[in-house]
Image (tube, helix red, strand yellow):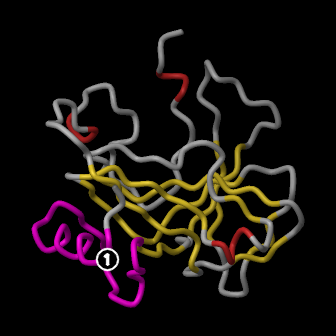
Amino acid sequence: MIFSDKKILTSIDNGKIVIEPFSRECLGTNSYDVHLGKYLAMYKGRVLDAKKHNDIEEVIIPEEGYIIAPGVLYLGVTQEYTETHNSVPFLEGKSSVGRLGIDIHATAGKGDVGFCNHWTLEISCVQPVRIYAGMPIGQLIYFAVEGDIENYYNKKKSAKYNKRTDRPVESMMWKNKF
């Protein structure tokens, strides 16, 4: 079951959902709009290795915007810091962003109960597009969880993305054992 606007507000009031900064204007019927932060990152290497740490270079999106290009994976970040303690958050791109040919996540649209951080976005596009810090980029949708939770993400020792940051975080696949 998807949370309604009233259920999202109730969860914010009781601390089960945290959104910072929160703006009532960003609350939809059953979602909350999030915005692109000012930091973008790109991998330095052309070939990435899943068993090794791949370095990134970071840019700050200037006021006049930044043109993203096809064939490059950009790591962006939401302006909003979020916590979710009673539901499963899903991040989907806004339709207006999709209509510009921008995808905001390659595979990682679902968060875990207990995720507490800014969201790293996996941004790609089909043609060059100028993007801006602060532009609406996605929407968070919250799904109810049935049953008790034993393993909150923010309490897992093996969680790789628990360190709070307002900057994009590169893949930590290399920390897995395979």
Answer whether residue 12 is magenta in the image: yes
For the N terminus, give its image quadrant.
Answer: bottom left
For the C terminus, give its image quadrant.
Answer: top right
Pick whichever, 148 or 97, lies toward us.
148
Identify the residue at image location x=42%, y=62%. Answer: 141
Identify the residue at image location x=28%, y=52%. Answer: 144
User: Horizontally, is 39 left or right of 2 in the view?
Assistant: right
> What residue is disc 1 on?
5
User: Horizontally, is 3 left or right of 167 in the view?
Assistant: left
User: Horizontally, is 100 left or right of 144 in the view?
Assistant: right
Q: Position of residue 67 (x, y in %)?
A: 80, 72
Identify the residue at image location x=39%, y=34%. Answer: 160
Q: Secondary structure at mark 1?
A: helix
Task: Note whether 157 is above or below 33 in the view shown.
Answer: above
Residue 44, quarter of picture: top right
Stretch in magenta: 4-31
Q: Residue furthest top?
A: 178
Pick whichever, 155 or 89, lies toward us.
89
Q: Position of residue 165 (x, y in %)?
A: 39, 56
Amino acid type, callout 1: Asp
Task: Note whether 74 is above or below 101 in the view shown.
Answer: above
Q: Position of residue 55 (x, y in %)?
A: 64, 38
Answer whether residue 17 is magenta in the image: yes
Q: Residue furthest left?
A: 14
Badge count:
1
Q: Residues within 10 Å of mark 1 (few under 14, many from 20)?
A: some
Pick whichever, 101 or 20, lies toward us.
101
Q: Residue furthest bottom?
A: 25
Q: Position of residue 126 (x, y in %)?
A: 86, 60
